[in-house]
Every structure is written in structure tokens, then in C-alpha cells.
Image: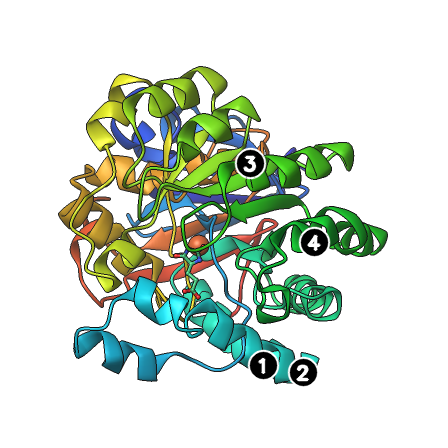
Amino acid sequence: MGPFDAIWLNARLATMAPGKAYGAIDDGAIAVRNGVLAWVGPRAELPATGTAAIHDAGGRWITPGLIDCHTHLVFGGDRAREFELRLEGVSYEDIARGGGGIRSTVASTREASEDELFETARRRLLALMAEGVTTVEIKSGYGLDIETEIKMLRVARRLGVSLPITVRTTFLGAHALPPEYEGRRDDYIDLVTGPMIDAVMAESLADAVDVFAENIAFTADEAARVFAAAQRHGLPVKLHADQLSDQGGAGLAARYRALSAEHLEYANEDGIAAMGRAGTVAVLLPGAYYFLRDTRPPPVASMRRHGVEMAVASDCNPGSSPAVSLLLILNMACTLFRLTPEEALAGVTRAAARALGLTDRGTLESGKRAEFVLWDVKNPAELCYWMGANPLSQIVRSGEIVQRPI
Ligand code: DI6
Ligand code: FE
């Protein structure tokens, strides 16, 4: 036995390791052992390969497996009727205040069986995977009662077991106030921070905890209570922050050393600076900005200035971003938020891994998981450039070629 199990040669590597553009290696080689990247570098420097299986990448570009670090992929029903209403001029906030919005998805999700939720989510997940997504985060938050939050998280876990993808789950019990708690906000936060999170933890169903802090959802003080509960349980936190108005969310996320703060269109400069100091990743969600026809992009220049790492995600959800294409989202990150293609690609690899607290993926470097994608492109910027094309050639996971259709 040689030192490696398999080698990929004749490849152009976008390692996404920090340093030069795309961490590119022009005539590169990748060697895999035991499902881990054992060696990555210029082909000319590849050590003796022994009896390893040799794969010819045919001059294709190879990137790390893509990571969609913010989705609400599991839900019942759809909101196409609300889309029509918004096109007639009714606002997203007004629909939410009128009992539609998140609450309408909550009703459909409570009604759906676990198998129905699994099947509809599975289709959406297959669409993401067909474009090279090998790690996905899935939030709860359309149950808002113990039984349905647990049902959603079980479905998310089951997706990760039944498909060749890593699923990270996030408990988002504080997504909206459920109708039966109208006028009893404190009681609902008591439920979320007590019996609900206890039930989630009893089955180990969550890897992190998230809160929607917004004038149509929860206040900063309520979010802080949920964060305190998460930390009592040893879970890292995330925050939907400053999406529709400045709620001081960026600063709050930084105070709790959140893994990430999401959206951030209305975040103030002090909050962004605090995120930079705390190492909290900004998760940019151009699909929601686009679909809600928002006009204020997130403060990307300020994020760059304060050294805030920027991730990019689909936010796949029925209300504000019914997106099942991370490549299209990359295009939006560039056209709508003016990210460079390199920043956008780092946003679905290196930065996305950090937003999930994962240190074993996100770049092509020795020691990381052998999870990568071969693309039929001449330049990595093409991954952000095409709209509705899929240049994927091959997915490798745990050092093995993933057979398609996946
Ligand atoms: N922000 C969002 O964009 C989604 N959730 C959130 O907290 C939207 C959820 C929905 O409208 O169903
Ligand atoms: Fe979201």
C-alpha cells in the first residue's frame, strides 16, 4: 500500500486558503487518504504515490464542497399566494402582521406529517446538492410548539443520514410569536428557553440556536434570554439581525460571541466593528434581499474595513427566499451586494464553514475532509457569472466519487 488511497491530477485548484486569489494552484494535485486530504499542492511537488488510484481531472477547476450555511429547508406548503399579494402592493411586514407570513407556514408545517416534510425537503436538498453543496445548515422555526419543532429537527437529521451530505441543525424556536401566545410574549420565551430547548437537547437535535430579532419578531432583550439558555446548554448562537430595521442586532450577536449574524442590511457601524472584534461571521442573504425587493444592501464596505468575514447562503425558505440554487445566489451576491467573485466563493466555502463552527472543511488543505467538486469552467469566477447554468462535473465526498443522480 502506498501512502495514499487516491490522487486527482491535471487539476486547477481553487483551494480557497487565504492568501492569493482563490488560493489558486494552476497545475495541482490532490491526494486522499482515509477520507481526508493527505496532500494538496503543485503537481510537480507531489510525493511518491505508491499504489493509489489515479483520477484525471481533465484540466478542470476543483473547489471545496460548497456549504449552504443558512437555510429553512424543512417546511410545509408554500407561499406563492403571498407572492401574488406582494405583487399587488401588500408589504411583507403587513402580510406578517395580518397573520400570514411565517404563521401561515407554521400552520402548514404543523399539519404535515414527518414523511411529507421529509419528502418535500428532500427534493429541495437534492437541487442544492446537484450544484455541489456537500454541507447544509437547516433551521427549525416553523413549528413554534415543542412537538412540531422536534418534528422539523428530526426530519433535518434524517436528511443528513439518508443523503450524502452533512446536515447541521439549528434550533430557531424564537422565529415568530405563535398565534396561541398572542399577548403573552414572556410566556412564549419561557417555553422556548425551558421545556422546548430541553426537549431539543434531550434528543441532541440541535447544533446551534438562532433567533429572529426584528420588529415583527423578537426584541434584543428577548433574544438575549434565548442566548443565555443556549449557552447554559453549551450551544453556540446565531442571530437573524437587522434585516428590515436597525435593532442593534450586530452588536448583540458580537456580545454573545455568536458564530454568525445573518442579513445585516440595516446593521450600524459600531455593531459591525464589534462583530469584527468578536470574530462573528456575517452571513449575507441576497436571495431575501432580491425576493423582497429590498433597497438597502448590507454594509459590505464596513465589513471589509472591520475584518468581518462574509459568508453567503441561500436562506431557502417559503416566504422571503424560495431559492434552491446556491450558484444563482453567488451571482446575486456579486450583482446586488458587489462582492467580488472571490469573496462570494469564499462565502460558500471558507467563511460558511466558520459560520457553522466547522474547522474540518471549507478549504482544500491537507488535514481537511476530502470533499470537493470538479467544475467545467475556465475560471473560478464563472461559478458566479452564469445565471441558471450548472457546470458541475463531479462531486467527491470522503474521498469517493459521488454517483449521480444523487
Ligand atoms: N428571516 C427570513 O428571511 C426568513 N426568516 C427570517 O427570520 C423568512 C421566513 C419566512 O418568511 O417564512
Ligand atoms: Fe433566514
CB-based contact (under 8 Å), mark 1 and mark 4: no
Query: Could you say which is closer to the camera, residue 113 or residue 42?
Result: 113
Label 1 secondary element: helix
> Cα distance, mark 1 to mark 3?
37 Å
Side of 194 where 207 appears, left or right: left
Q: Position of residue 9 (x, y in %)?
A: 40, 42
> Cα distance, mark 4 to mark 2?
31 Å
CB-based contact (under 8 Å), mark 4 and mark 2: no
Label 3 secondary element: helix
> Cα distance, mark 2 to mark 1?
6 Å
**Mark 2 belongs to which amino acid?**
Asp
Q: Which of label 1 and label 3 is nearer to you?
A: 3
Looking at the image, is 41 positioned above or below residue 207?
above
Looking at the image, is 352 positioned above or below residue 376?
above
CB-based contact (under 8 Å), mark 3 and mark 4: no
State the residue position of label 4. 187
Mark 3 within 8 Å of ligand 1, using the beta carbon? no
Q: Position of residue 137 (x, y in %)?
A: 54, 53
CB-based contact (under 8 Å), mark 2 and mark 1: yes
Query: Could you say which is closer to the camera, residue 138 or residue 95?
Result: 95
Label 2 secondary element: helix
Numbered tag placed on residue 119 in the rendering: 1
Numbered tag placed on residue 115 in the rendering: 2
Side of 27 where 395 appears, left or right: right
Mark 2 within 8 Å of ligand 1, using the beta carbon? no
Name the N-terminal-most of marks 1 and 3: 1
State the residue position of label 3. 221
> Cα distance, mark 1 to mark 4?
33 Å
